[in-house]
Every structure is written in structure tokens, then in C-alpha cells.
Image (tube, rainbow, N blue to C red):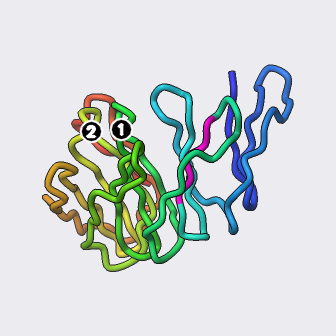
Amino acid sequence: QYALSGGGKTLRLWDLSTGNDLRSFRGHKDEVLAMAVTPDGGSVISGSRDKTLRMWTLATGRCVQTFVGHAHSITSIAITPDGRFAVSGSQDNTLRVWDLTTGECLQLLRGHESGVTSVTVSPNGRLAVSGSRDKTLRLWSLVTGKCLRVFKKYTHWLEAIAMMPDGRFVILG
């Protein structure tokens, strides 16, 4: 069993049975703020204050793709269940949908009025939910890139979002 951690500009892979630091992932030019592991467990995507996402191979620690497009820090990442796409949220108030094979930004999701703090993807990979410092929760179609619904009844920033495995409910924090 393994765990990943981010500290400063570096990610680390840990062996939970021994407590040993197995591998370091270096390449970001500023602090790592977000990460997500691909469903097959073979790669990790990290997001940083340096405005980039990087995809790393867990077995080697090698960066195999850099994703560029956000204008500010990347604060959250979610990967679709099929492992083909990632959704990143940023302090530039946007989300981007990335093709993990080509590195291309497929969609730019606009609507939040302040930084995006969290994002999650539905079990079928067709929807995303994002939270923001603008105190809204937004439901997005990853097929069309359109915002389907805005939930505005919150009194504080939405820092964390998780979707239930059946996709019917979202938990906020």
C-alpha cells in the first residue's frame, strides 16, 4: 500500500508498510496544491501555484505531460472514471477539461466569480461539480461544457466536495 503527499514543489510516494519515501516527483516551479491518481493507479496528476498540471508515471517518477492554460494557481483536480480526462479548478475562476493522452485543453468552463476551490466528477464521467470562493456550487456538463445549475445558498467558501458513488448526492465542506 502506498500514499502520495505534496510538500513545497515536490510530490512524494510513500510505502505505508515501511514508512519509507520511495520516490520524489520534481518539476513544478512553485508549491503543489492538488493531485489526483488515475483510476488504473499508474499515474498521478499534480496542480501547482506555477499554473501548470503535470502527469507523472508512478513507477518511474517521470513527468510525461505538462498541461498549460490556467492563468493562476491550480487548486483542485478530478479525473474521469475512464481515466481519459482530467478537470482542473483554478484561482483564475475557471475549470478546464484536459485530454490526458494529448495534453489538449478540450473545454474552458467559465461562470464562477472567484477562485475554484474544489471539483469532483460523476461516476459516469459526464458531469462535474465545482465549489468556489464565490460561495456557489455549480453543476457542469462535461459533454457540452455548459453550466447546468448554480446552487447559491451557502454562507462560506466551499473548500471540499465529494460525490457519492452512485452520483445522486454531493457532500460539501
Q: Is residue 171 visible?
A: no
Please say whether residue 55 is one of the residues in the magenta stretch.
yes
Left or right of 108? Residue 63 is: right
Of the numbered discs in the image, which one, if any, rests on residue 24? none
First-in-chain label (2 vs 1): 1
Query: Where the C terminus falls, by quadrant?
Result: bottom left
Tag 2–tag 1 contact (CB < 8 Å)? yes
Q: Is residue 155 visible?
A: yes
**In what element is the residue under mark 1?**
loop
How much space separates mark 2 and mark 1, taking CA atoms? Answer: 10 Å
Q: Which residue is mark 1?
A: 84
Of the numbered discs in the image, which one, if any, rests on residue 125? 2
Left or right of 23? Residue 102 is: left
Q: Please name the amino acid that badge 2 sits on.
A: Gly
Quarter of the rendering containing residue 93: bottom left
Please say whether residue 172 is one of the residues in the magenta stretch.
no
Segment colored magenta: 53-57
Query: Where the N terminus falls, by quadrant?
Result: top right
**Residue beneath the point at 76% across and 25% down:** 16
**Residue beneath the point at 21% across and 56% down:** 140
**Residue beneath the point at 74% across and 53% down:** 26
Figure check: 85 above or below 92? above
Q: Residue 47's x, y, as percent? A: 55, 58
Quarter of the rendering containing residue 85: top left
Q: Residue 169's x, y, as percent? A: 26, 40
Main SS type for the magenta part? strand
**Residue beneath the point at 48% across and 35% down:** 38
Left or right of 27? Residue 137 is: left
Left or right of 21? Residue 60 is: left
